[in-house]
Structures are given as C-alpha cells and as structure tokens.
Image (cartoon, coloured by chain):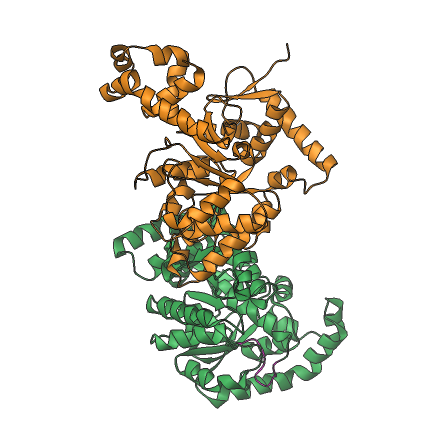
Chain colours: A orange, B green
Amino acid sequence: MDTLHNWLAIASVGLGGQRYLQLSEHMSLAELVALPASTLQQIGFTQRQAQLLCYEASSWVDQALQWQAEAPDHHIIPFDHQLYPPLLKETRQPPLVLFVKGAAELLCQPQMAMVGSRSPSPTGRKVARQLAAELTQTGILVTSGMARGIDSECHQGALQAGGKTLAVLGHGLRQVYPSSNKRLAADIVQAGALVSEYFPNIRARAEFFPQRNRIVVGLSIGTVVVEAALKSGSLISAQLAVDYNREVFAVAGAFYNPQAAGCHYLIQQGAKLVTSVADILEERALFVDNGLLNQSEKNITLDLCSKQLLDNLDEQPIPADLLAERVGITVTDVSIALLELELAGKVAAVPGGYIIVRST
Amino acid sequence: MDTLHNWLAIASVGLGGQRYLQLSEHMSLAELVALPASTLQQIGFTQRQAQLLCYEASSWVDQALQWQAEAPDHHIIPFDHQLYPPLLKETRQPPLVLFVKGAAELLCQPQMAMVGSRSPSPTGRKVARQLAAELTQTGILVTSGMARGIDSECHQGALQAGGKTLAVLGHGLRQVYPSSNKRLAADIVQAGALVSEYFPNIRARAEFFPQRNRIVVGLSIGTVVVEAALKSGSLISAQLAVDYNREVFAVAGAFYNPQAAGCHYLIQQGAKLVTSVADILEERALFVDNGLLNQSEKNITLDLCSKQLLDNLDEQPIPADLLAERVGITVTDVSIALLELELAGKVAAVPGGYIIVRST
C-alpha cells in the first residue's frame, strides 16, 4: 500500500494525532498499518479499532480515494503532506488526514478564525460581515465553520470583499449542512475551500461540531468571537484558542443583548476587545506578514526573529509555543517567522514541532 | 479670626491643596493668613493672590458665612474637618474647603463615582439608572456631577431606589445648573447632598466642570463610565481615577454606538468591563464594607489588613496608595481599612496621608 493509503487507513479507525505521534516514535506508518490485530491491541488499540484497521479500513480508503478521483479540486492532505497546516499540527489533537474541496494551498496561509452565535442580532450579523470583509481586504484569510448566523456572515463578508475563505465542516464533504447553505458552499469551493477531517460519506452528527471547532481555531493565528451567549460553542472555541496559545478577540455589544454576554465574559477573562479591524491587525506579525510594514522594516523584524529561532532549534522537535516562550516573542510572531523559515528550507515542521534543517 | 475664617480666606485666593500642604510644614494656618502681602509674595503667592488675601478675602469669607447661616443644611467643611473625606484628601489637588448643601456626613461614606455622556443613547440612560439603583441598594453611595444625560440618570436611579446620592457641582451652591435640573437638585438636597469647592455666589464657567470631575473621582473608591465618546470629559475622569489609583469600570456598548467608543477604549486600556452590578461589587472590600460577608469573615479580613497597615504606619504621613503598594493589597481595601482604623481612633488622616495615633 502507498503512504496515502496508510494514512487513510489509520485515520479511518479514529486514531488521534497525539496517539499517532507516540506510536511514530517506535515504528513507521507502514509498519504500524501492517501489524496484526493482536499486536495492535497490545499497543493500545481497542479491539474494535484493531478489527477495523485489519479488516474494514480498505473500504474506507476506497471511499476516500474514489471521492478524490471525482474532481481535480478534491484533495486529501495527510499529516506529513507539505500542505498540512503547521499551526494545526501543533494542537493537542490534530486530525491525521484533512479532506479539502477547493484550493488546498490556502491551508497554510495566515488565517483568522471568526466564530459566533447561530442566532445573532442584526448588529452582530453586520459586524461579522464587515470585519470579515476588512480582514480579507488586508490579505488575511477568514476561517469559520459555515454554521447559520455569524459563521455564514463571515464567509459572505470575505467573498463579497473579493477574497477567499475557508469553511471547516462537521461532516464529510459529500454533504452540505445546513442545506440552506448549498449556494454558500458552492461559492466557497470556487473562492476558497471546504475542509473536513471526516471521510466524504460521513453525515453530520451533533458531537462533530465541537470537534470541528478545534480545527477552525487550530488553523488560525487568532480567533474573533463576534457575538456569543454565555455557555455557547463559541466560548468553547475561544477556550481552545487560549489553550493553543492563540490570540482571542471579542466584539463588545449592548448591555442588554444576551448575545453579547459571552463576548463580555471573554473580555473580562483577557480577550482583546475589538472595535475595528485595526484592533486585530495591531498584532504586529500580521502587519509584517501582509506587507503593511515596508520591506526593510519587515526584513529587520524577520531577521531578528529568525536568528533567535534558529539559535533555539536543533534536531529535537520543539513546538512553536515553547519556542515563543523561550525567545520571548508572541506565538503569532514565531509562527509566521517559522513559516518563512520553512519556505526558505531552513526549518521543517515535523510531528511534535519544528526542527532545524542542516544544509548538507 | 477663627479657624474656619482662615480656611475660607486662603481658599478664596485659589490656593491649591498641594501648595497649602507645603506651606503648612513651615507655619500654621493662622500664621499664614496673618502674613503681610510682601511676605506672601516672597513665599510664592502671586501679587494678585497676596492682595486678595490681605485686602479682599474678608468679603468672600462674609459671603460664605452668610450662606452657611441661611439654613441648617448649609455646611462648610474645611480641610481639617472630621467630615473632610479622607479619599479626597489623598488626591493631588484637594480643595481646601467644601461647601455642602444637605447631609454633609455622607462625604465620608464609601462612594462609587458614575460618569458619562451628556447625550447618551436610550440604552445608556437605562443602564445608568439601573446600575445606580443597584449600587444604592447594596449600600454604596452613588456620586456624580448632576450634568445632563448619564449623570442625571445616575442620581435619579439612586433616588428611585430609595437611597441617597452626592452631586458635585462646577459652580457655587446658590446656582443650579443646568436649570432643567432644579427639581433634581432639590431632591438631592433632601436625600443626599450637593457639594462644591466654589464659593456660594460663584457662577458656572466652562473650565470649572473638568475641575469638578476631579472631586467626583477623588471622593470615590472607583469610577464607573456608563457611556462616553472618545475624547470626552468622562475619559478625563477615568484617567484621573487611574492617576489616583482607583478602580475604573466601563460599560460596553454596541459596535456602532459612538457613545460606546470611549468605554471600549478604556476597557482596552485596562478598565474592568461591567456587565452587572456584581462586576463592581466583586471588589472584595466593597462586600466587606457593606456587610455582604458575614461578620466573622469581615473581622478576619479587617484584622489582617489592619495589622499590616499599622505595622507600616508611623508619625510620617503616608498616602493610602503607597500603603497599598507596601502591603500588597488594593487601594480600595486599604482605604476602607484605614477608615475603620480612623473611626477606631488608631490612625489619623492628615495632610499628606495617614499617621499612627499612639495611645498616651
């Protein structure tokens, strides 16, 4: 079996990214997939997982490969693919395979997650659309979950600004949910991409949506919460962003608006209050990355940052947040500098973080 | 001349509190007032101030004393009076004399300043009234400036909750400004007090209102900004509160509401976002002071705090904010503990801060 085959096989049994990384220290992917069921159970697979991998994975693999073959914009991006997004790789539970319908190369672009209520106020809708449009105009990719309400407004805002957008879905890419978003989904495939960790035929299930949120947040430099009630999914997304050491932004709202309560809570907990797109762009690294600083200033910044990073890297993988801590700059700055270094072939993103690439 | 006479005389020439404190290190109040004009100029009085003090102060003094004699609720509270508020005394520019119409004993009660726009949104008005009423119900005195808009709503909210309220005015107490607030002013005199540093006959002038704000803020444990545009007087008040090391609270508002912009700016600068009165009351000291903690807990807190304070006090006056820094508790906690200690006769508020009172 080729490598993609193997990745799909282990993804189909629901192996978590973290568990895979542990196993990969002891054996190659091909060795893992070739193990007999009894051995798989000895190394921690459940009986069901072991059976799936040995006897049923191939039908899942076939399903995926068939879907991929159906259209040139259907992509399968396994964990070790050059287009697998480095920021997502750093999170606690990265998916082993991403299914992408549309422009897969967008996965590695600097992204801002935008999330919020499925039943926002009219003001919330307007703010979501405006901020998404303005972020898009500055060259930042808006990523959201294509749910009703704020999510959809954010995608619409990005598209209306003439830009692209990423939608991460809680089901396989043969389905569109909610069905009222069929048109929006088609537009996103044309200008952006739909992304999912679920095999193409898998239908939406309630528990998939919180799972999906970890990818929206994990792909992104930061997360903007536009409107959210207390105890909402958006607050869980914001908490994930904090856990991943990413910036959290929140839009304030009127005192009596219950959809502002979640945002106000986040601000009280330390999220940055957003009154305009400038408050988001203030993150210096975003300016640098989007050419809003002049080139010489950009080079100086990157050179300084890059040198510090290279000094702190070796053959042992180090995650970006730990690097950020060591060199005393924000994880955003570090992530962008690492991306540049990776593109320049000086570092490599591997399971567990970044390593230095020695010229031979 | 008696002491009150002397205080009124030096207040009438516009001597600042800070300057008086410097002079008081070298001579008594009576000695200062008795100096000839030439000597006054040698110690830093302008020619005009020296002339005023020597030749015209008595007519100001007569005006003030006449006003005081007109009604039993007309009070003159000089700097050394037991009712002169200790928190105000700590500020950079405390007035040497306060004119009070109403219940002067309120001056030393724990107060929360509430400020905001003169042209608020309907939501802003409603929030101001609600928060003022709720603060009042928990026993906290609401202090504001009786301007149109938010100020007036705050006073109304306090009164409607059956409580008292303090209004600090930018003119002498014979005037009511704005005249539309005649009824409100009369209500405040009945349930609370009007306060001014200006002699009774002095008319409102534009430059007096920012001056007035320093007293509103200086009297108070913290300042709540309800609605404020950018570059508004309320933002200056908030800055004063920061300078005085007092807590700043701000109410968030809708994204497109220009009267929310000032509050959002303050929150970005570190003000605490207020979603309910609980966010204000969270300041532990306010709970303690208002009996919302049970008595034993209150005593333990106060005992601990008091002991630390007494250990840090001696015959040299120390301002409360410095004490707070030294003992590592908030200035609010310190202020309230000091008030208790002062009432117990263990410390004294003097020019420049607090000193210990040794039992003889």
Looking at the picture, how far across and down is residue A211, in whole percent? Answer: 36, 37
Looking at the picture, how far across and down is residue A249, in whole percent? Answer: 49, 47
Q: Is residue B201 magenta?
A: yes
Q: Quadrant of the C terminus of chain B?
A: bottom left
Looking at the picture, how far across and down is residue A317, in whole percent? Answer: 50, 19
Overall secondary structure of the magenta section? loop
Relative height, residue B79 to residue A239 (above, below): below
Q: Is residue A15 visible?
A: no
Residue that appears at 40% across and 83% down: B190
Left or right? Give the position of A61 relative to A76. left
Left or right? Give the position of A241 relative to B303. right
Residue that appears at 58% across and 75% down: B7
Residue B293 sits in quarter? bottom left
Relative height, residue B258 to residue B145 (above, below): above
Q: Nearer the viewer, residue A315 or A344?
A: A344
Q: Nearer the viewer, residue B237 or B359?
A: B237
Residue B131 sits in quarter? bottom left
Residue bounds of the magenta highlight: B196-204
Q: Quadrant of the N terminus of chain B?
A: bottom right
Looking at the picture, how far across and down is residue B231, in whole percent? Answer: 61, 64
Q: Is residue A182 magenta?
A: no
Q: Nearer the viewer, residue B153 or B340?
A: B153
**Image mark count:** 0
